[in-house]
Amino acid sequence: MEEKVKVALDRLRPTLSGVDVALADVRDGIVKVKLMMSTCHATMSEEMALEIVEEQLKEAVPEIREVIAA
């Protein structure tokens, strides 16, 4: 599952204006990510970015139960 999450994150990154996301951990269907917000270019809040990441990852990898910030 970790490899599927990495591939999905690679596809997702370009769509997150001013936000980078890194995989911290995958365990028991729970994905932990680190969000790095650009102070110059970020156009969304961290909560909004996390919601988008969770939605997109769950769509790409249905076995994900939850995505949380690390």
Image (cartoon, helix red, strand yellow):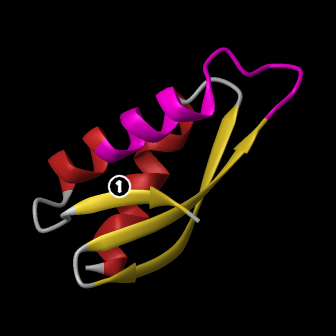
Name the residue: 40% across, 43% down: 53
Q: Position of residue 13 (x, y in %)?
A: 54, 42
Q: Is 52 situated above or below 65?
A: above
**Disc 1 element:** helix
Name the residue: 18% across, 60% down: 61
Name the residue: 61% across, 19% down: 44
Q: Where is residue 37 in the image (x, y as percent from the top left)?
A: 75, 37
Q: Is 55 situated above or below 2?
A: above
User: How many neighbours does mark 1 have within 10 angstroms: few (below 14), some (14-19), or many (20 or more)?
Assistant: some
From the image, tell me which residue sits under label 1: 8
The span shown in magenta is 38-54
Task: Say if the magenta span includes residue 37.
Answer: no
Quadrant for residue 27, please give it: bottom left
Q: Position of residue 40 (x, y in %)?
A: 89, 20
Say left or right for 68 vs 2: right
Say left or right for 63 vs 60: left
| Amino acid of disc 1 | Ala
